[in-house]
Amino acid sequence: MDNALRVSVFGAGYVGLVTAAGLAAIGHHVLCVDVDEKKISSLTNGEVPFFEPGLPEMISRGVASQNLCFTSSLTMAIDHGQVIIIGVGTPPLSSGAADLSQVLSVAASIGMHIQHRAVVVVKSTVPVGTSELVHEAIQDELDRRGDSVSFSVASNPEFLKEGDAVRDFMVPDRIVIGVSDEWAGDVLGLLYEPLCKSDGVLMTMSTRSSEMCKYAANAMLATRISFMNEMARLSDIVGADICEIQRVMAADPRIGSKYLNAGAGFGGSCFPKDLRAIRAMGIDFDCDLPLIESVIEVNTRQQTVLIDKAREVLGSLKGKRCAVWGLAFKPDTDDIREAPALHLIHALLAEGATIVAHDPVVQWLPMYSSLSPDLFHIVDDPYAAIADTDVLFLVTEWSEYRTIDVQRMTDLVGDGVIVDGRNIWAKIDFTRTDVAYLGIGRQSNVEQVRETYAVELAG
Ligand SMILES: NC(=O)c1ccc[n+]([C@@H]2O[C@H](COP(=O)([O-])OP(=O)(O)OC[C@H]3O[C@@H](n4cnc5c(N)ncnc54)[C@H](O)[C@@H]3O)[C@@H](O)[C@H]2O)c1
């Protein structure tokens, strides 16, 4: 490629690794660096440290073309990059604010070692004003060294979705760059040129707008989820069906069809932490954000919806055998950060239930897999998880569960309970089975099952 740039990517996580492999795929010379030496050594050995469809293939192609290399040497990465991308973690502090220590530590390292002109790009999700802090941190170290090196700091938030990250990178619907000087804008224009096949994909703005738009976009999506969960709760009470309401809403082009599924609340590595970070920004800047507060509150309340549904039928779950299908926070990823399944498992164990779980990809839960297998274990066959179960909780809508053998599932659950946390079996008629089936925000067949029992008992 004529305009190939030397790029360093700090962080080999979900964002850093996809970015590094994606930029290598479009012809740049990319060095990806991480402080986690185990991660770098598995990548060097051709192993991808997490599950993301299409990513292993893209990494292999990048390595084979010699456009993609890995290192744990921060100085080597700083020496390499004309563009230095920061894609490290920004986990929440106990206040909810984003912890910028990883980002600022990379910035300090850059200031300590940089010898050539570069654009430093903040890709991590960060509060408004962070690009300025990164600039200061680099400049402080240069001043300490008594050196003068020209550099720019730009913001370039990431919008990829885990599970679809490769496609999101290669066919972006928008690439946002926030810059404070023309040169940085030109360099990032070159960096992303091969991906900007249609007009309007590249959106250039101030660093503050760029930082803010990532939070605004995630807050909007989270708001839709909480809104639908609230409508589901009301539908449950008034006897309406949220699936029908969703269908009608989705037909309205002003609303659109995405993010309208009711469920057990949003989880994952972004929405919960980003919502808390916006709330913290509101406090910092003395700006009331009542809508954001409500979105968080509705989501917290929703985390108990699955166990509450099971209690409607069984009362206490003490001593009950429970099956949990779906541990990842959404399908097509192995990410369990703040996954709804974790809240459910925590509540079930606290109530004295035992759990057999299944997930097509997640085979280990750090907090629970070390418990006695009598209390919690993960099996690799979904049907094995539901043998003799009292309740089956469907938490994550993997396609494997959508296409499950319903006859086999209902035979195994017998006269137990199915709580369908994503309404994926809403179209199935469970009235001819002994299963008590409950969805979210819609009528269940529980009354009918109870009547059948009553007739049988009377007979
Ligand atoms: N995961 C997503 O879907 C997603 C989407 C958009 C934006 N983001 C944002 O992108 C950022 C990264 O998220 P992630 O999910 O990739 O995180 P992650 O935890 O998967 O990866 C972060 C990586 O950074 C490494 N790291 C920490 N300090 C480092 C340093 N000084 N030098 C080099 N590497 C270092 C860690 O070892 C880790 O491998 C976060 O701000 C997140 O909010 C994430």
Image (cartoon, rainbow, N blue to C red):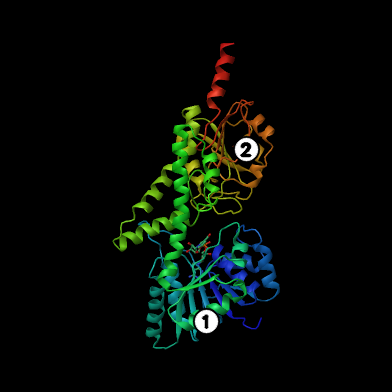
Q: Is residue 322 visible?
A: yes
| 42 relative to 276 in the view: left or right | right
In the rendered image, the vertical position of residue 83 relative to residue 60, given as above or below: below
Q: Quadrant of residue 452?
A: top right
The residue type indicated by label 1 comes to Asp
Element class at badge 1: helix
Q: Which residue: 39% across, 56% down?
A: 276
Specify the quadrant of the image occupied by residue 210: bottom left
User: Looking at the picture, how far across and down is residue 269, in whole percent?
Assistant: 49, 56
- Asked if the beta carbon under badge 2 is closer than 8 A to the nearest atom of ligand 1, the reply is no
User: Toward the viewer: 455 or 143?
Assistant: 455
Where in the figure is residue 254, as x and y percent of width and height? Answer: 50, 53
Mark 1 or 2 closer to N-term? 1
Q: Position of residue 145 (x, y in %)?
A: 40, 86
What residue is rendered at 58% in x and 53% in y?
334
Quadrant of the rendering where the C terminus is positioned: top right
What kind of element bears circle 2? helix
Report which residue position mark 2 lands on.
Answer: 385
- The amino acid type of the residue labelled 2 equals Ala
Quadrant occupied by the N terminus: bottom right
Tell me if mark 2 has few (under 14), some (14-19) or many (20+) residues whose alpha carbon lies within 10 angstroms of its own: many
Q: Which residue is mark 1?
A: 186
Whole-percent x, y for residue 316 in the image = 46, 29
At label 1, counting other C-alpha atoms closer than 10 Å, the crowd grade (few under 14, some 14-19, many 20 or more) is few
- Label 1, label 2: how far apart the Cα atoms are: 55 Å
Pick the front one: 230 or 3: 230
Residue 439 drawn above or below residue 123: above
Residue 119 shows which numbered tag?
none
- Indicate yes or no: mark 1 CB to ligand 1 under 8 Å: no
Is there a contact, CB below 8 Å, between mark 1 and mark 2?
A: no
Give 301 or 146, whichever is nearer the viewer.
301
Of the two numbered discs 1 and 2 in the rendering, the one whose residue sits closer to the viewer? 1
